[in-house]
Amino acid sequence: MATGQTSTPEQIGSSGDTLREAFGRALVRLAKDGRDFVVFDADVAGGTGVHRFRAAHPDRFYQFGIAEQNMVAAAGGFAATGIPVFATTFAVFMLRALEQARLSVAYAKRDVKLVASHPGLDVGPDGGSAQCLEDLAAFRAIPGMVVVAPADPYETELATAAILEYQGPVYMRTGRSPSRRLFEPGHRFELGRGQILREGPDVSLIACGVEVARALDAADILATEGIGARVVNMPTIKPLDRELIVECAEKTGCFVTAEDHNIHGGLGAAVAECLAELAPSPVEFIGVRDSFGESGEPEELAEKYRLTAPHIVQAAKAAIVRKVLRK
């Protein structure tokens, strides 16, 4: 759906699909369609979904081993030939190559897509050392870097095609755990644009990644209490859809942001910066509160770190109270 459309897409429950496998499928399909690009891997093709591309196009797949800094630096050099590069690894390992992403990719204005699986608490049992809660903040701070976090497998496939079409550096999250399918064929993805998934006059819930499904669940709970929540999927954290955020401020007057990420520097910070400049409004933040994670199942961790729908509901009520007190 494009911005401004208000019908809720059908939710078809747990499909068992993952964002990383959707990304791998998208690469194979794009290559089949004749798109010119290569894929770089840092010894985790089975974990990022690019094993599909490796099997289908071994001549366009480059293995760098456990050497993420070399991989990203080489991606910048390879892209200088005019051929786009997808450089892939786990999100926490991509942080190792932050300097190369800054200089060899962004500073050099190379057409490199850094695509990272296993972000946030959604990593689950691998524990705090593997749960990357800082990546959106780190890559969002790099000048010229586009930052994307799609919400479901179908949107991931659309986003993969969109970032290939875009000429320039991109950081995109995928995901490890099975994802609930939120969108059906006909859903549209556009870099820099959010989508209204549900209308409501009382509070705006702005989410990315796995938190979009939880925001929709929270809106259902709020509706049973007579509270109307506008739910916004914000898959592009940078550049942010500032126009849509200002519209939400005019329509609802208060916000909850939700992300599987530290509350510092990610989606919530981006929304708050926009509002501080253009439309001051109360904002409550759902995210990990400046701590590392721990080992556990993704849903257990989401509950412990207060990322689930009931916590979004609580935050929405707090935002509404703050809005009323301002009047």
Image: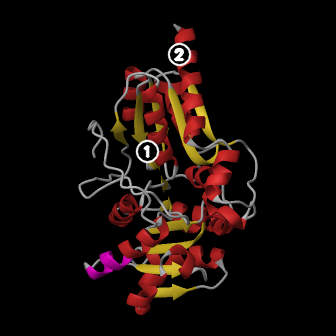
Residues packed near mark 1 inside 10 Å, few (<14), some (14 to 19) or many (20 plus): many
Question: Which residue is more in the foreground, 230 or 56?
Answer: 230
Q: What amino acid is found at the position of numbered circle 2 in the picture?
A: Lys
Image quarter for residue 287? top right
Q: Is residue 198 above or below residue 117?
A: above
Range drawn in magenta: 27-32
Q: Position of residue 164 (x, y in %)?
A: 36, 67
Q: Give the colour scheme of this rendering.
A: secondary structure
Q: For residue 39: magenta?
A: no
- For this orientation, the residue located farthest to the top is 327
Magenta: main secondary structure: helix
Sequence order check: which comes first, mark 1 or mark 2?
1
Q: In the rendered image of this protein, does residue 176 appear above or below residue 82?
A: above
Looking at this view, is 221 or 76 the one in front? 221
Q: Which mark is residue 225?
A: none
Give the SS element for disc 1.
Answer: loop
Q: Between residue 163 and residue 308, name the one nearer to us.
A: 308
**In the displayed image of the protein, which residue is found farthest to the front?**
224
Q: Position of residue 94 (x, y in %)?
A: 62, 67
Horizontal side of 127 relative to 184 (left or right) equals: right
Q: Is residue 154 left or right of residue 46?
A: left
Camera sees residue 256? yes
Crowd class of label 2 (few under 14; some 14 to 19; many from 20; radius 10 Å): some
Q: Position of residue 134 (x, y in %)?
A: 66, 53
28 magenta-colored: yes
Q: Is residue 314 left or right of residue 144?
A: right
Local SS, label 2: helix
Residue at 42% x, 87% y: name it: 60
Would residue 99 appear left or right of 85 to someone viewing this image? right
Q: Which mark is residue 234?
A: 1
Q: Which mark is residue 323?
A: 2
Q: Position of residue 49 (x, y in %)?
A: 49, 76
